[in-house]
Image (cartoon, rainbow, N blue to C red):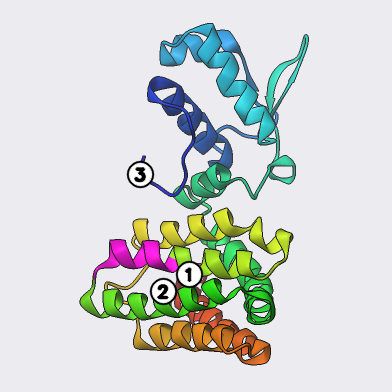
Amino acid sequence: MGVGYEPGIAGRHGTVLDTIGLQITSGELPEGHVLTLEGIQDRFGVSRTVARETMRILESMGLVSSRRRVGITVLGAASWNVFDPRVIWWRLSGTGRAAQLRSLTELRIAVEPLAAGAAARSASAGQRDRAVALAHEMRDLGERGELDAFLQCDIAFHTLLLHASGNEMFGALADVVAVVLQGRTQLGLMPHQPVPEALDLHERVASAVAGGRPVDAEEAMRELLAEVRDAMLPLWRR
């Protein structure tokens, strides 16, 4: 699909998984709907092994439950593994895109300023230098309008800070942040050229992390994410 996650499943198997995952997360297959292996085989023209493995993966994500004499039942959103990158992408691709972007942005606002402050205290010398280099590279790429390369650099920057925080809980959210950054770009929700304020704030965060100034790093990251939130407000209000 070229979108923000690597399902680790090739060919028709991946098509079956993505199709059913999208239908569940969009509500097209509502909570309580019962699926069968035979129905999946007939619909997609796949083997029983592929159908069973697809259901196993969906069950691991909390999207379905399988019980003897009952079948494979679609579960409600309260049961989903909402941090799974595939679930996030499916939700971003469906009718609930605005709500998913809002949830993810609010999560980032809650976590990333603290992670940036922690990185200013805990990052290694190499991580500090890398943060500065990435921020400078983002400015160069952003001003040239090279959005694909900018995206990869942006992901690397935020991933670095989450891991450099020294907090394994923050580090575990790196894939979540990567998916939402990719989603904003690939779903056409980013400006054609990054706004100058965002470039400035990335450099402010990097400078504070490199200089060991946790209060400044936290404040700059909070301002950066406020800019992201403000850019998303028109979509949320639709």
**First in residue order: circle 3 vs circle 2:** 3
Contact, mark 1 vs mark 3 (Cβ under 8 Å): no
The residue sitting at 56% across, 8% down in the picture is: 38
Query: Residues in magenta?
Result: 146-154
Contact, mark 3 vs mark 2 (Cβ under 8 Å): no
Q: Where is residue 214 in the image (x, y as percent from the top left)?
A: 67, 87
Q: Read off the residue under disc 1.
A: 157
Q: Main secondary structure of the magenta part?
A: helix
Give the tally of numbered discs. 3
**First in residue order: circle 2 vs circle 1:** 2
Q: Any magenta on residue 149?
A: yes
Amino acid at pointer 1: Phe
Amino acid at pointer 3: Gly
Q: Read off the residue under disc 3.
A: 2
The residue sitting at 45% across, 85% down in the picture is: 203
Q: Any magenta on residue 80?
A: no
Q: Position of residue 148 (x, y in %)?
A: 29, 61
Asked which quadrant contains residue 46, the reply is: top left
Name the one closer to the observer, 40 or 58.
58
Label placed on residue 181: none
The residue sitting at 45% across, 14% down in the picture is: 43
Q: Read off the residue under disc 2.
A: 134
Amino acid at pointer 2: Leu
Badge 2 element: helix
**First in residue order: circle 1 vs circle 3:** 3
Contact, mark 2 vs mark 1 (Cβ under 8 Å): yes
Q: Position of residue 157 (x, y in %)?
A: 48, 69
- Mark 2, Cα crowd under 10 Å, few <14 / some 14-19 / many 20+, is many
Give the alpha-carbon distance from disc 1 to disc 3, as whole Å: 21 Å
Asked which quadrant contains residue 127, the reply is: bottom right
Placement of 148 over or under 77, stated as above or below: below
- Mark 1, Cα crowd under 10 Å, few <14 / some 14-19 / many 20+, is many
